[in-house]
Amino acid sequence: MAMNREQKRAMQKSGQVGADGAPAAAPRDRRAAAQQRVKGERTRPVEFVREVRAELRKVSWPNRQEVLRYSMIVLVALITFTALVFVLDVVFGDFFKNLFDTGTTTTTGLGALGAGLF
């Protein structure tokens, strides 16, 4: 199975593979445990919290540098697409205003700004 460094480190951290990349233990059949549980049986709140904490330990959390980098990417993309939608709104608004113009000469809103784009 091809894995990158991050996947190998995460698997080593969770104990699934050893330092050399070989499986640390025989893989468990998770379906067998799920089949043993009766379908109508509910999980107790304490057991639920314990399982949630166990799952959260398995998560590969990003470090501070990655969070900042991804946040900047999202912020730049948000600003870019917002500007694109704004420009398209002004251009198409003026286009359709001029297309359906009934002869009145008053301009309101961003009409003057959009007229400068043509």
Image (cartoon, rainbow, N blue to C red):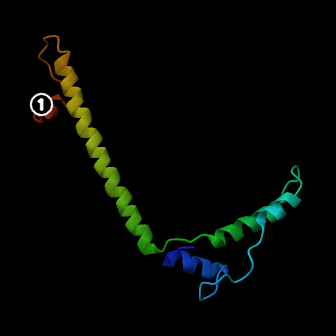
Image coordinates of residue 98 in percent, x first then y, are: 16, 20
Q: Quadrant of the N terminus?
A: bottom right
Residue 46 in view in this figure: no
Q: In screen coordinates, is 71 left or right of 50?
A: left
The answer to which of 78 and 35 lies nearer the viewer is 35
* Quarter holding residue 56: bottom right
* Left or right: 55, with 8 as reference point: right
Corner quadrant of residue 53: bottom right
Mark yes or no: residue 62 visible. yes
Indicate whether 58 appears above or below 15: above
Q: Residue at left 85%, top 58%?
A: 35
Q: Hey, which residue is sitting farthest bottom in the picture?
A: 19
**Depth check: 116 or 35 in front?**
35
Residue at 10% of width from left, 34% of height from top? 116
Q: Residue, x 71% and y 70% (percent of image)?
A: 54
* Picture coordinates of residue 22, whole percent (x, y): 64, 84
Residue where numbered disc 1 is placed = 115
| Disc 1, SS | helix
Would residue 44 be found to the left or right of residue 103 on screen? right
In the displayed structure, 24 sits above or below 30; it is below
| Residue 94: x %, y % from top left | 19, 27
Q: Residue at x 75, y 78 (%)?
A: 26
Front-lying residue, 107 or 99: 99
Q: Quadrant of residue 99?
A: top left
Q: Position of residue 63 (x, y in %)?
A: 48, 74
- Is the residue marked by circle 1 packed among few (<14), some (14-19), or many (20+) residues within 10 Å? some
Q: On screen, 105 above or below 12?
A: above
> Left of 45 or right of it: where is 105?
left
Circle count: 1
Q: On the rendered image, what quadrant is the C terminus found in?
A: top left
The type of residue carrying mark 1 is Ala
